[in-house]
């Protein structure tokens, strides 16, 4: 019994440390949904690539997502010491690379306050691109996705340029997220102009470019609005507020007045799926002219409402396809998933009805 308890405790600690874990829905009966039409054709967004099957933010993960039919691949963007965009979930690379095994970088372990939270580890802004390229990616959730561990140590940290080249080669879009833009600006590494310049160089700076730029911050998107025609997405979480203090809370941004204000600078919203579970936010956003791209559909029971579990193993796969279909029927205009093949099939099933 002690062993079981310890395993559960370790799993919980790892998952909580992973960050951006969506709020869990309760096992309450779901009310009948009012089917709505999306404002745009529904897109499947590969969340950090096919991250349920390969270590996230690697070319291997993005390539598998493309093979599985994703319309867009998502690189979270952070900056290096020499101002190169690389794809990592966070600038803290302790849990997503083998940096801790590199004795030559041991002295770079640091303690930093990022968006009001204390982080201890290694950070991209303290490494040049050449140094980062000596590291190798590893699975961020090894207890939840043990099959992915076999790929640890095989893949480099990709640059945005490499992700763009891959997307262009396969004729899919990219959906980059600017991570902690206020923090990076505060340490002398502003993101906006660099990102716009790179997209322009790729020929992707128009309103119909296969690009969405997303951010949990507000002023970051407003600055981008003045620099580019690329479509912008305001991310929202079930709790908290934008780190730049530009809004009192994400909840306030979901009111009719809040959504109208978002529509002045953004093309759509990316809410935590728990925020859109009954369709109300989807309908309200559509009234404001905003597209809705909720995050993140994951196959593991741990991330699903209890009513969608199959079995009792948290790492076992549940009925995520049915959940995606339900949201598509509620009118979402796209959705993020760690399992693009499941997302593509679920979208097709919803569109048959």
Image (cartoon, grey):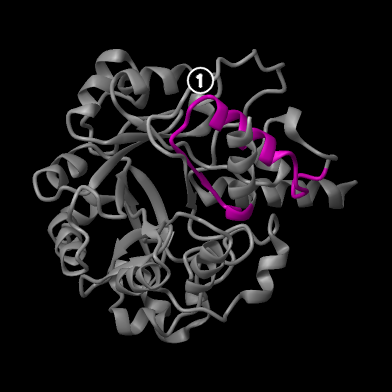
Magenta stretch in the rendered image: 313-341
Task: State the residue at coordinates (31%, 49%).
Answer: 212
Out of 218 and 249, give the one closest to the viewer: 218
Q: Quadrant of residue 305?
A: top right
Q: Determine the residue located farthest toward the right in the rendered image.
A: 1
Give the x, y percent position of residue 330: 53, 24
Task: State the residue at coordinates (31%, 55%).
Answer: 210
| Left or right placement of residue 353 versus residue 337 in this view | right
| Left or right placement of residue 237 versus residue 193 in this view | right
In this rendering, the answer to whether 216 lies above or below 330 is below
Instruction: Name the residue that disc number 1 marks.
Output: 279
Q: Is residue 322 magenta?
A: yes
Out of 272 and 83, give the one closest to the viewer: 272
Task: State the residue at coordinates (18%, 52%).
Answer: 206
Q: Quadrant of residue 197?
A: bottom left
Give SS at disc 1.
loop
Give the x, y percent position of residue 241: 33, 30
Q: Determine the residue located farthest toward the front in the rendered image.
A: 352
Q: Residues within 10 Å of mark 1 (few under 14, many from 20)?
A: some
Task: State the residue at coordinates (59%, 47%).
Answer: 343
Q: How many numbered circles does the render carry?
A: 1
Q: Is residue 219 magenta?
A: no
Give the x, y percent position of residue 39: 38, 30
| Left or right placement of residue 312 versus residue 307 in this view | right
Give the x, y percent position of residue 38: 43, 29
Quadrant where the C terminus lies?
Answer: top right
In this rendering, the answer to whether 80 lies above or below 315 is below
In this rendering, the answer to whether 47 lies above or below 263 is below
| Left or right placement of residue 120 versus residue 63 in this view | left
């Amino acid at each position: 019994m002690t062993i079981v308890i310890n395993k559960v405790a370790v799993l919980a600690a790892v998952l909580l440390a992973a960050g951006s874990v969506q709020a869990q829905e309760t096992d309450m009966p779901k009310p009948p949904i009012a089917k709505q039409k999306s404002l745009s054709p529904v897109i499947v967004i590969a969340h950090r690539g096919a991250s349920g099957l390969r270590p996230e933010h690697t070319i291997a993960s993005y390539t598998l997502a493309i093979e599985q039919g994703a319309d867009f691949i998502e690189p979270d963007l952070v900056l290096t010491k020499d101002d190169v965009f690389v794809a990592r979930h966070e600038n803290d690379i302790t849990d997503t690379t083998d940096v801790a095994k590199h004795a030559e970088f041991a002295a770079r372990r640091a303690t930093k306050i990022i968006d009001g939270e204390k982080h201890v580890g290694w950070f991209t802004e303290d490494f040049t691109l050449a140094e980062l390229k000596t590291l190798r990616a590893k699975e961020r959730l090894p207890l939840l996705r043990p099959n992915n561990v076999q790929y640890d140590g095989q893949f480099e940290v990709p640059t945005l340029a490499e992700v763009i080249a891959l997307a262009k080669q396969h004729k899919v879009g990219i959906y980059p997220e600017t991570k902690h833009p206020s923090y990076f600006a505060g340490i002398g590494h502003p993101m906006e102009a660099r990102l716009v310049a790179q997209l322009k160089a790729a020929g992707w700076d128009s309103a119909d470019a296969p690009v969405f730029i997303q951010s949990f911050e507000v002023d970051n998107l407003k600055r981008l609005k003045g620099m580019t025609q690329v479509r912008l997405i305001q991310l929202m979480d079930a709790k908290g507020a934008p780190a730049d203090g530009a809004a009192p809370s994400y909840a306030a941004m979901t009111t009719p007045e809040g959504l109208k204000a978002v529509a002045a600078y953004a093309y759509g919203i990316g809410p935590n799926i728990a925020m859109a579970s009954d369709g109300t936010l989807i309908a309200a956003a559509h009234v404001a002219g905003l597209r809705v791209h909720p995050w993140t559909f994951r196959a593991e029971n741990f991330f699903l409402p209890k009513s969608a579990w199959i079995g009792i193993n948290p790492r076992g796969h549940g009925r995520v396809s049915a959940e995606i279909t339900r949201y598509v029927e509620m009118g979402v205009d796209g959705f993020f998933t760690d399992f693009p093949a499941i997302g593509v099939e679920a979208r097709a099933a919803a569109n048959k009805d």
